Amino acid sequence: MGAPVRAAGAWAAAMVALIALCLLAGCASGQEKQGEATGTTDVEALVDCVDDARGSEAAAPVSAPEGLRDALEQAVEAHSGAYAVTCASADGSWSVDVNGDKPFVSASIIKLAILGTLLDQAQSGVLSLDGTVTVSPSDIVGGTGVIQASGAGESYTYRQLAAYMIQDSDNVATNLIIDAVGMPAVNEYASEIGLTQTVLNRRMMDFAAGDENYTSANDVARMLQLIYQGKLVSPDMSEFALDLLKGQHDDAGLLEGLPAGSVFAHKTGTLDGVFNDGGIVLDQNPYAIVMLSGDAERSQAQACMVDIAQAADAAIG
């Protein structure tokens, strides 16, 4: 059996070589015609042909950091409550998640989608970030924020409201933006950019509406990746959004598990039993990290965030 096998192998190798020569010949023929017009030599044309062939090969997939998935799963299982976690490279080359597509109550992390809608409408000219709105008595709501302390009658630009919404999680600012862009527009925009579980069902602090706002860890990570890649509306709008996230005033959560001095551009969200955080770690290997929780005690959720951030840092480095 040895000789026939060797013969078959030699025949197959010869056929492969013949096919390759035919392909190169065809390519070279095409390049020859192009060379007549451009003045390139046959050798240069053949080199270009080989380079083109190499370039047409699909890039090898990038694997997630070794051990990251197991570490994230262990962190989630070690704490009481329901959790979803997504950790993904900022450039989108790899992603790891635990319950990543499961919808969770969003709390204030929904404000990322509201911000995206505002910037989209500003880019298209529906409104101007420098346009102003005056706070009326009916706009004042409780919860987080600073505008309610100033009371009605004050005027703000949408640019200022965006900063208050993201950096102070200001509920008055958020509702003013929702009123300006329209709640249906937020949900439409979320769908357009590929968010599958993100839904704005009510304004901030409107518990009488009888519904909640939802998102998923994968949806939040996608928005963060778009911001980092300059693809959230436009490069300029993405840069504006990233600067807002860098200026976040609430440093509780995932940042507590990252090394001292880490730059973490993020947005938090908190309600009863809900402690969410998601952002981009801006180091030599930038990545998005998101944790959503439900039915969790604050101490358990915060401890889980620390464990998750430490696991990600150890795996990604």
Image (tube, helix red, strand yellow):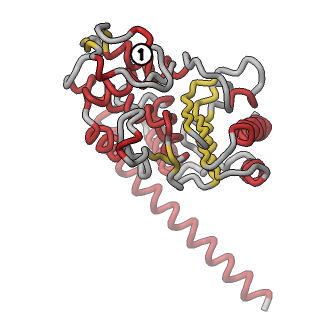
- 235 left or right, relative to 6: left
Residue 263 against residue 300 in the figure, above or below: above
User: Is residue 288 toward the left or the right of residue 168 in the image?
Assistant: right
At a point 41% along the width and 14% down the height, the residue shown is 147
Side of 94 where 135 appears, left or right: left
- Give residue 285's position: percent from left, percent from top: 67, 31
The percent position of residue 213, horizontal first and vertical second, equals 43, 44
Residue at position x 44%, y 41% from top?
45
Where the C terminus falls, by quadrant?
top right
* Residue drawn where x is 34% and y is 27% of the image: 175
Asked if one can make out residue 58 in the rendered structure from this viewpoint, the answer is: yes
Q: Which residue is mark 1?
A: 148
Q: What residue is at 75 percent from the left and 54 percent from the top?
A: 77
Location of residue 267 with respect to 106 vertically, above or below: above
Which quadrant of the rendered structure holds the N terminus? bottom right
Q: Residues within 10 Å of mark 1 (few under 14, many from 20)?
A: some
Residue 244 location, x and y as percent?
Answer: 48, 19
Residue sitting at the far bottom: 1
Residues 233 and 20: in front is 233
Q: At which x and y percent is residue 255?
A: 69, 27
Residue 88 seen by the camera: no
Which amino acid lies under the numbered mark 1 shown in the image of this protein? Gln
Where, by quadrant of the figure, is residue 283 drawn? Answer: top right
Q: Residue furthest left?
A: 126
Front-most of residues 68 and 119: 119
Task: Give the secondary structure at mark 1.
Answer: helix
Up-down: is 244 above or below 278? above
Q: Nearer the viewer, residue 30 or 299?
A: 299
